Image (cartoon, rainbow, N blue to C red):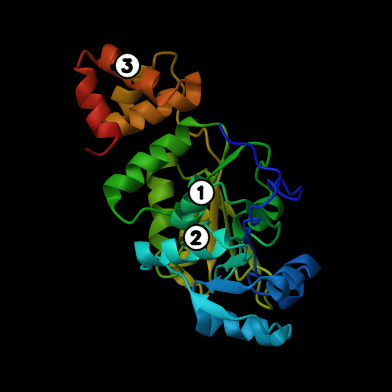
Amino acid sequence: MQIQTSFIENTRVGLTAKGKLYLVPTPIGNLDDMTFRAINTLKEVALILAEDTRHTIKLLNHFNIETKMRSFHEHSRAHEVTEWVELLESGQDLALVSDAGMPLINDPGHPLVQACLEEAIDIVALPGANAALTALIASGLSSEHFTYYGFFPRSMKEQKEVLALVGSRQETAIFYESPFRIKKAVVAIEKELGADTSVVVARELTKRYEEYIRGTAAELAAYLAQQPLKGEIVLMLEGGQLPLQSNLAEKAAQLELPYKAQVELAMAEDGLSSKDAIKQVAKQLGIKKQDVYQAYHDL
């Protein structure tokens, strides 16, 4: 168990206070979305860790931020994480930024955050721009219950699995997608969940050519067949389109779900832990619990 008090110093006499790691969101397109707090934080920290320094330098120059910057990305090695943790332990504050939006959301940074927590270094997240939530609240789809899935899967097998999961849940699903693959993604949605499934595509958020395309899966598939898109895309669709059945085993059999997806289904619908869901799926299918466990954990 760990309790963090982000802004109340709790240092014993004679010990140097540790620095803080600030997770600072940056604009997703419109520089006016940069907050006063984000600007001040980037000016005050000892060092900024950026996903791509060539990109972030433009932001720093725009706001006259002269703080030194180093790169930190998905290919950064373990010894670099150790270096930044040691700097924080010496009392220096650091800021982590991504190219756009909220750090760690489909961006590097998790190893650093985990390493900091292991050394009881405070992690302070600043609120700010996020493409998924920005798109959701203007989509017209339900925003009371939703799940963010990351990037839409590329393989047909993974697409079938995730769409089966979306279709079983009464909530909005949010994905990021490339403009080069959005047409195939919508076609997959139409095929797996039905032509009348409500779909919203949001692109170029906060920029001059911001656009929302709302309609059914069939309507969007037809539109995208004639109209290629450009820019960064958020793909959203209504969930709960697959027929509900009272028995999980019958539902899974009908959908031909793999073991992992069945466990996730049990967790979502029955509120079970992964351990209990694995046990339930194994019992209902009459198979060894170890087989389901290995499938769920990709062993």
Residue drawn at 36 percent across, 65 percent down? 79
Q: Which of 190 and 19 is in front in this view?
A: 19
| Residue tagged 1 | 119
Q: In this view, does 251 lie to the left or right of 143?
A: left
Residue drawn at 70 percent across, 82 percent down? 65
| Residue tagged 2 | 85
In the image, residue 209 sits, relative to residue 172, either above or below, namely below
Q: Disc 2 to disc 1, how far (Cα)?
A: 8 Å
Q: What element carries label 3?
A: helix
Q: What residue type is labelled 2?
A: Val
Q: What residue type is labelled 1?
A: Glu
Q: Which amino acid does label 3 sit on?
A: Lys
Residue 257 visible in the displayed image: no
Mark found first going from the N terminus, 2 or 1: 2
Give the image location of residue 97, x and y in percent: 58, 68
| Residue tagged 3 | 279
Residue 181 visible in the displayed image: yes
